[in-house]
Image (cartoon, rainbow, N blue to C red):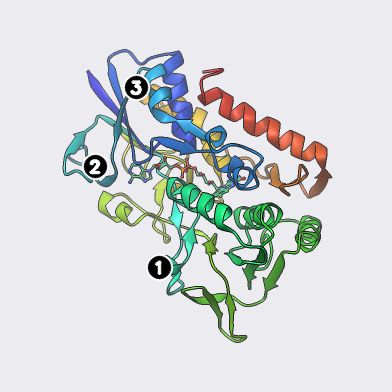
């Protein structure tokens, strides 16, 4: 038997598991090595914080999925890859050999550029640490409690809206110099800014947070902001252990992959999702990990069977949906922006359908 090792239980690998369950690979043993047993679906997490979903609705039970799909599960953290000896190093000290390796381990919060962020802010990942902390924060929140969310991309903005709705807290969204929702159309940014104002969320634009201390966000010029907790939603970084892979990485440290999602120069290693650096660099958004899932599954099968892998073709624009937390959402695609209850219905339908594929109902 040869060994296919799936490293990380991210959005692309759950689809690989599903397809292996539907059509096993003869002659191959498959193992999933993952740090978390419950794989969070990020699209629904702000909905969990807003109280719209129970946490388990946004979590994929990897042991159950692996068992249904005939894949062995190992719960541990990878600490390195030896691409020549074809082994993955594990935190418990044991090496795991493989014949074909696929990496879908995501990104980590980028706390390195702002002193104090790693020590005093609550990062959005890992989500298995975030959810219990957020449950405590929600349970203990006082009216008027100052809460800051640093980083006004889609995740930070949705979380600020969710917390403002759920708690009677004084929420500040620190958008910094890049402003609210960088890269989104102006109309969407205007609509979201209005929604933030209606919820009483203070939007702080123009100045980056330069330091975090206990209960304070410090700015370069205009002093500081008292907040407890400070939630860190500012950017994605490559996990430090990727330096221990000997694989080609981009300037930010993510694994360079070719058009077929293969690690540069290593036809027996694939990578997908946030950990992978594709083309000129795709946004670190779950939608790409989801889209890469079927291509990755097909390519692992092709290589295992001695066939050529297929190209991954990312689409130019994609539907971006942002929940306002109150049963409405805003969406944008190809320059058009729409808002309303039906947009939330669309987002909810897409998200629930995605989860049903991996939670058992339709697996
Ligand atoms: C709160 C929040 C909301 C978001 N909302 C959206 C959204 O609405 N739309 C969108 O497109 N994107 C969203 N994102 C971004 C999205 O979460 C990521 O782009 C997406 O999760 C990337 O998927 P992935 O498959 O690359 O990895 P992940 O989903 O991060 O999964 C990685 C997996 O690998 C495991 N792992 C990590 N390191 C190791 C290791 N060393 N060894 C073993 N296992 C490991 C982890 O336990 C995890 O199971 C959001 C992010 C956050 C934090």
| In contact (CB < 8 Å): disc 3 and disc 2 | no
Q: CA distance from mark 1 to mark 2?
A: 34 Å
Give left or right: position of 136 versus 242: right
Q: Quadrant of residue 321?
A: top right
Q: Which residue is mark 1?
A: 119
User: In the rendering, at what x and y percent does residue 52 appear?
Assistant: 66, 40
User: In the rendering, at what x and y percent does residue 1 appear?
Assistant: 22, 17
Secondary structure found at label 2: loop
Say whether disc 1 or disc 2 marks the residue closer to the N-terminus: 2
**Mark sitting on residue 83:** 2
Q: Nearer the viewer, residue 7 or 77?
A: 77
Say whether disc 3 or disc 2 marks the residue closer to the N-terminus: 3
Say whether disc 3 or disc 1 marks the residue closer to the N-terminus: 3
Q: CA distance from mark 3 to mark 2?
A: 22 Å
Does residue 45 appear in the picture of this structure? yes
Give left or right: position of 177 versus 74: right
Dot 2 alpha-carbon crowd within 10 angstroms: few under 14, some 14 to 19, many 20 or more: some
Q: CA distance from mark 3 to mark 1?
A: 37 Å
User: In the rendering, at what x and y percent does residue 2 appear?
Assistant: 24, 22
Mark 2, ligand 1, within 8 Å: the answer is no
Q: Nearer the viewer, residue 289 or 108?
A: 108
| In contact (CB < 8 Å): disc 1 and disc 2 | no
Q: Residue at x 44, y 45 (%)?
A: 128
Q: Nearer the viewer, mark 1 or mark 2?
A: 1
User: In the rendering, at what x and y percent does residue 207 appear?
Assistant: 62, 77
Q: Which residue is mark 3?
A: 71
């Amino acid at each position: 038997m040869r060994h296919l090792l799936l490293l990380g239980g991210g959005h692309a690998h759950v689809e690989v598991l599903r397809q292996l369950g539907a059509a096993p690979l003869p002659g191959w043993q498959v193992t999933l090595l993952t740090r978390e047993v419950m794989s969070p679906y990020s699209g629904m997490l702000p909905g969990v914080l807003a109280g719209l979903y129970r946490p388990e609705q946004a979590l994929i039970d990897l042991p159950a999925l692996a068992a249904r799909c005939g894949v062995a599960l190992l719960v541990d953290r990878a600490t390195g890859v030896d691409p020549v000896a074809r082994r993955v190093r594990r935190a418990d000290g044991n090496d795991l050999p493989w014949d074909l390796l696929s990496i879908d381990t995501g990104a980590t919060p980028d706390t390195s550029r702002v002193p104090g962020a790693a020590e005093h802010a609550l990062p959005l990942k890992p989500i298995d640490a975030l959810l219990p902390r957020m449950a405590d924060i929600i349970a203990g929140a006082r009216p008027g409690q100052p809460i800051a969310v640093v980083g006004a991309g889609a995740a930070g903005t949705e979380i600020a809206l969710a917390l403002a709705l759920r708690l009677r807290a004084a929420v500040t969204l620190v958008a910094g110099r890049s402003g609210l929702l960088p890269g989104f159309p102006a109309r969407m940014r205007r609509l979201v800014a209005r929604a933030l104002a209606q919820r009483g969320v203070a939007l702080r634009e123009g100045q980056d947070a330069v330091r975090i201390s206990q209960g304070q966000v410090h700015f370069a010029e205009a002093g500081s902001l008292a907040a407890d907790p400070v939630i860190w939603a500012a950017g994605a970084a490559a996990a430090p252990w990727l330096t221990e892979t000997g694989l080609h990485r981009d300037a930010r440290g993510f694994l360079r992959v070719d058009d077929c999602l293969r690690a540069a120069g290593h036809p027996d290693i694939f990578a997908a999702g946030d950990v992978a650096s594709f083309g000129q660099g795709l946004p670190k958004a779950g939608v790409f990990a989801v889209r890469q899932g079927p291509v990755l599954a097909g390519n692992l099968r092709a290589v295992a069977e001695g066939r050529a892998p297929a190209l991954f073709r990312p689409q130019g624009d994609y539907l971006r949906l942002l929940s306002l937390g109150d049963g409405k959402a805003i969406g944008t695609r190809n320059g058009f922006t729409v808002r309303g209850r039906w947009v939330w219905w669309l987002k909810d339908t897409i998200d629930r359908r995605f989860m049903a594929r991996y939670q058992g109902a339709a697996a």
